[in-house]
């Protein structure tokens, strides 16, 4: 019979293999690694969403002057101080385009 995960490690500990403390630490490390992989995957999805949304907003800003003006008035208040100059340059560049 093939056992998996905790059961397999517990059987090894009972047979005189790895001490139980070591088995628990291995399981905790495996669980932490799994959680870290999940968190990394979630961050990748979130980053991709932001990229897609940002591209859509930029396209709308180029195509729709009213939308661009609405963002120009409201976005700086929501942005971090370090991002306001970047936004100002973006709006200036968009206004120069035909």
Image (spheres, rainbow, N blue to C red):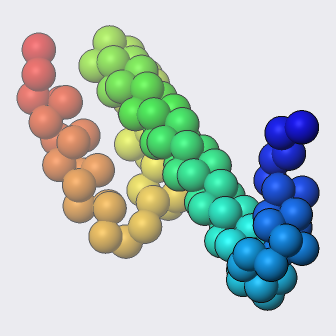
Q: Position of residue 22 (x, y in %)?
A: 72, 83
**What residue is shown at x 85% (from left), y 71% (from top)?**
15
Q: How many marks?
A: 0
Q: Position of residue 21 (x, y in %)?
A: 79, 87
Please name whichever residue, 13 or 33, is drawn nearer the observer in this view of the structure.
Answer: 13
Please name whichever residue, 40 or 72, is drawn nearer the observer in this view of the structure.
Answer: 40
28 versus 37 height, above or below: below
**What residue is shown at x 57% (from left), y 52% (from top)?**
37
The answer to which image quadrant residue 9 occupies is bottom right
Q: Quadrant of the N terminus?
A: top right
Q: Residue furthest front?
A: 15
Whether residue 97 sits left or right of residue 45 in the image: it is left
Q: Is residue 24 visible?
A: no
Q: Quadrant of the C terminus?
A: top left
Q: Is residue 20 visible?
A: yes
**What residue is shown at x 32% (from left), y 61% (from top)?**
84
**What residue is shown at x 80% (from left), y 78% (from top)?**
16
The answer to which image quadrant residue 80 occupies is bottom left
Q: Position of residue 97 (x, y in %)?
A: 11, 22
64 versus 75 height, above or below: above
Whether residue 68 sits left or right of residue 39 in the image: it is left
Q: Position of residue 35 (x, y in %)?
A: 68, 58
Whether residue 57 sits left or right of residue 98 in the image: it is right
């Amino acid at each position: 019979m093939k056992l998996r995960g905790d059961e397999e490690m517990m059987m090894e500990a009972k047979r005189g293999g790895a001490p139980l403390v070591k088995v628990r630490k291995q399981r905790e490390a495996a669980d932490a690694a799994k959680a870290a992989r999940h968190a990394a995957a979630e961050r990748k999805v979130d980053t991709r969403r932001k990229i897609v949304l940002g591209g859509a907003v930029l396209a709308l800003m180029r195509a729709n002057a009213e939308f661009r003006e609405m963002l120009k008035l409201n976005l700086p208040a929501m942005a971090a101080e370090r991002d306001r100059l970047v936004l100002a340059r973006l709006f200036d560049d968009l206004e120069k385009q035909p």
